[in-house]
Amino acid sequence: MSDLQQKNKKLLYILLGIAAIMLALSRASVPLYQRFCQVTGFGGTTQTTAQNPNKVYDREMIVQFNADTDPGLPWVFKPDQRLVKVKVGQSVIISYTAENKGNLPVAGTAIHNVTPLKAGQYFEKTQCFCFGQQILQPGQKVHMPVTFFIDPKIMDDRELKELKTITLSYTFYRHDSPELEKAVKIYEDGTSSPANKK
């Protein structure tokens, strides 16, 4: 084998290795990015915790609920209530309803965020349907609960001292669709909610 053929063969192996690494990274990017957002609160991403705070404070806030559905998903998706008034540290349970209006079973995945974005790091969920795959049969309607509280650490944040209203937004996409990938990319490139990028 000539020296040129050996170099070409080595280059081919290198390129195949790079392609394999890029494929693995692309498959891992969504869960890794979701974890990064959940840990840091980046892009208004809410936090997830297993325990509630042990004190409820007098400071009250209004939490509004928003729901959007990508046109590629034949679902009706809405909050069961538009808003609640909560005290900082108070655990609250609310729910959203999704209904499959299509003729076939469809899997959907919800992406969520909180506005104002800085409040995301203080919005703690103990139960949520977000980022998981939800499968609805034709005509099936489900109620999906969310349990949350506002972390008392928000009281120490001077930038949010006057904050009175927080909005929790969910957008449902067809699971494993290009639209879902684009929505996750929005979080990577900017910090806006997919619901605001219409």
Image (spheres, rainbow, N blue to C red):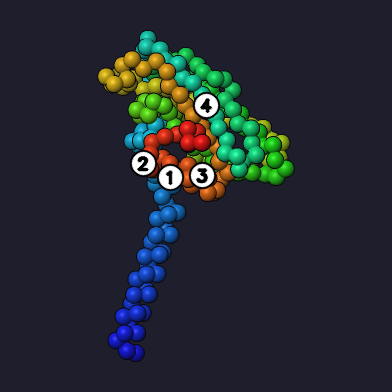
| First-in-chain label (4 vs 1) | 4
Q: Residue 62, located in which quarter of the rendered image?
A: top left
Mark 3 → mark 4, Cα distance in angstroms:
18 Å
Locate residue 158, reporting x and y percent: 27, 19
Nearest to N terminus: mark 2 or mark 4: 2
Q: Please rate how many residues cluster around mark 2, counting C-alpha atoms within 10 Å: few if below 14, some from 14 to 19, many from 20.
A: few
Relative side of 166 to 40, left or right: right
Q: Secondary structure at mark 3?
A: helix
Mark 1 lies on residue: 185
Amino acid bearing label 3: Leu
Q: Earlier in the sequence, mark 3 or mark 1?
A: 3
Give me the C-alpha separation between circle 3 and circle 1: 9 Å
- Of pointers 3 and 4, the one earlier in the residue sequence: 4
- Classify 10 Å Cα crowding around label 1: few (below 14), some (14-19), many (20 and above): some
Q: Residue at x 36, y 17 (%)?
A: 163
Q: CA distance from mark 4 to mark 1?
A: 20 Å
**Nearer the camera: disc 2 or disc 1:** 1
Local secondary structure at mark 2: helix
Q: Are marks 2 and 4 in contact (CB under 8 Å)?
A: no
Q: Residue at x 47, y 42 (%)?
A: 183
Kindly identify the amino acid type of the residue bearing the numbered disc 4: Asn
Label for residue 66? 4
Q: In the displayed orientation, state which residue is furthest to the front.
A: 198
Disc number placed over residue 198 in the picture, else none: none
Q: Amino acid at mark 1?
A: Lys
Counting other residues with Cα less than 10 Å from the Cα at mark 4, is it few (<14), some (14-19), or many (20 or more)?
many
Q: Can residue 13 be seen here?
A: yes
| Pointer 3 residue | 180
